[in-house]
Image (cartoon, grey):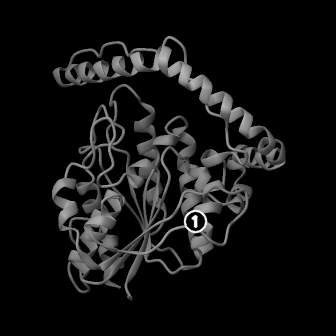
Amino acid sequence: MIGDVWLCSGQSNMAFGLTSKNEFGGDAQAATTVPAANDPQMRLFVVDNKTSLGPLSDLGGAWKVCTPDSVAHFSAVAYYFGRELRTVLKRPIGLIVSAWGGTNSVAWTSLDALKKDPQLRPSLNTYEKNKANFAKNTADYPARTAAFRSDLAMWQTNVGNAFNEQMKTWYAAARQAKLAGQPLPPAPVPATPAPVPPNPPDGGSAGPSNLFNGMIAPLIPLAIKGVIWYQGEANTGRPTEYRVDFGDMITDWRQHWNEGDFPFLFVQLAAFKAGVVQSWAFLREGQLQTLALPNTGMATAIDIGDWGNVHPQDKLDVGRRLGGGFQPAGAESGCGPLRLGQLAAR
């Protein structure tokens, strides 16, 4: 099969499968999308989750033909994006999903990039600490994990079950208040905080460079057409730094692939607790400023999010918007950014 291969990366909203479930259900269109997903000209690959302190040369996963069975748990955003390209460009499309929920941008950035930018020095310090303590943390990890599981079971029984019910009630009431333009009710707080799991010996999925090493480096130098990216929720605690982290990561990937400025298309964060969590708005501004990099494109999702759900169910429009600028060779640019139509027509 000869066609275009796209790398689809980010955190949970990219990893989120067509039939995945969360507290508010799965993808809104899954019931009709999955049974119709028979396309031998589309191939799917999911990279196994893996962290590492050094770049790996191999990874887990396998290519699969797009069928209802193979697509059911495949990334909804990636599938809808690929389906859009198949419809418009009429060529084989390969989709590689390398995504991990709850992860930050520096985890997807190489050690080389951390060393180059002085503003990323704190992340470099964390990496060096993880590396220096790896042997000790490996020895302690089984005991710390056992203690955490015991504490978590006790907390869930005594606090967690009741708190989860309180949160469900609060979400429903907060949504109604938001729609009515009324003040939000106070959010519940657990009687005691949940125990925090121990970090894996290498720092886990939060460790700087760990995901680049384990889930991106093994893909290089596989030829790719471009990247689609849906991430940023994990960085909303430091939105000002994200505009540095994110831009450095894009440049870093392009340098490692050595294919020039391939298209890098990303999703601006959807609406979530708008008016309550201002850091999300600041992070969206940082994403917007990233468009200063060449051959980047941004799909907005502010109008198709869910105020009470960090995993909005509308993945169809996200995928369509990511693919909306691609046109057949010689065609006029469509509803997406003009430069994407130009890239597709080259």
What residue is shown at x 57% (from left), y 59% (from top)?
249
Residue 323: x %, y % from top left:
29, 67
Quadrant housing the C terminus: bottom left
Residue 20 placement (x, y as % from top left)? 33, 49
Q: Give the residue at x 71% y 33%.
A: 144
The outermost residue toward the bottom is 2
**Residue at the spot 30% in from the left edge and 65% down from the top edge:** 69
Q: How many marks?
A: 1
Q: In the displayed structure, does residue 317 sit left or right of residue 257? A: left
**Quarter holding the N terminus?**
bottom left
Q: Nearer the viewer, residue 232 or 25?
A: 25
Q: Where does the image place residue 12, in percent across and percent down from the top left?
A: 43, 48
Examine the rendering and report whether any part of residue 129 can be seen: no
Q: Amino acid at mark 1?
A: Ile
**Label 1 secondary element:** helix
Give the residue number, with chain letter if any, for mark 1: 216
As drawn, 172 above or below 316: above
Pinpoint residue 336: horizontal percent, then vertical percent: 26, 65
User: Which residue is nearer to you in this view: 242 or 310?
Assistant: 310
Which of the 4 quarters of the picture holds residue 150? top right
Residue 226 visible in the displayed image: yes
Rendering quarter of residue 32: bottom left
Q: Nearer the viewer, residue 314 or 275?
A: 314
Q: Nearer the viewer, residue 290 or 141?
A: 141
Density class for disc 1 (Cα within 10 Å; few <14, some 14-19, many ≥20) is many
Q: Quadrant of residue 241?
A: top right
Q: Does 171 appear above or below 68?
A: above
